[in-house]
Amino acid sequence: MRERHIRPIAICIVEDRGRLLVFAGHDTVTGEQFYRPLGGGIEFGETGVQCVVREMREEIGAELTQIRYLGLIENIFTCDGVEGHEIVLVYRADLVRLEQYRQEPIRVDENGETIWAWWVPLADFRNGQKLLVPPELLDLMGE
């Protein structure tokens, strides 16, 4: 049996002109597509801020400015038929390099695998056209 544990992660909200920088995920069991801001697991001895700075640097080569803490979400979910439990520290930040706001798609290096990040209109999440996870994220963002 696979050991179950709570995973601490930190994610970074980056907005631009009503758009949110996210990557797309796919649940292979339900067929559902979902979107999540970039970020990742908090390493031992690392703060949430240090995590989002490291993750954004590693994943898309981005430097951040104006980093602010928004809050915490406890996320209990099932994806690919496996239960998950995350403690999600949510931050908002701006990109230092302005040209990154014009890039799309943005190549993301996720542990040696290439995935893509997109600028998705917040309206698509608000009206239910696209699923943003964790589900409480829009409320925490004040959307």
Image (spheres, grey):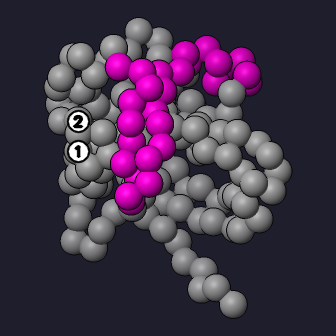
For the residue carrying disc 1, how many other residues have a C-alpha within 10 Å: few (<14), some (14-19), or many (20+)?
some
Contact (CB < 8 A) between labels 2 and 1?
yes
Which quarter of the figure has residue 40? bottom left
Total numbered labels: 2
For the residue carrying disc 2, how many other residues have a C-alpha within 10 Å: few (<14), some (14-19), or many (20+)?
some
The residue that label 2 is drawn on is 62
Residue at the extreme right of the image, as rendered: 30
Residue 82 coordinates in the image, percent (x, y)? 71, 68
Kindly state the secondary structure of the residue where label 2 is placed. loop
Residue 77 coordinates in the image, percent (x, y)? 68, 58
Side of 113 relative to 84 (left or right): left
Going by the numbered disc 1, the residue's amino acid type is Arg
Kindly state the secondary structure of the residue where label 1 is placed. helix
Residue 93 coordinates in the image, percent (x, y)? 28, 31
In which quadrant will I find the N terminus?
A: bottom right
The residue stretch that appears in magenta: 103-129
From the viewer's side, name the closer residue of 73 and 109: 109
Going by the numbered disc 2, the residue's amino acid type is Ala
Q: Is residue 123 magenta?
A: yes
Residue 120 numbered tag: none
At a point 73% along the width and 24% down the height, the residue shown is 128
CA gap, disc 2 and disc 1: 5 Å
* Camera sees residue 71: no
At a point 64% along the width and 85% down the height, the residue shown is 2
Task: First in sequence, mark 2 or 1: give its number.
Answer: 1
Residue 29 coordinates in the image, percent (x, y)? 81, 56
Which quarter of the figure has residue 107? top left
* Camera sees residue 110: yes
Residue at the extreme top of the image, as rendered: 17
Decide: is 120 above or below 109.
Answer: above
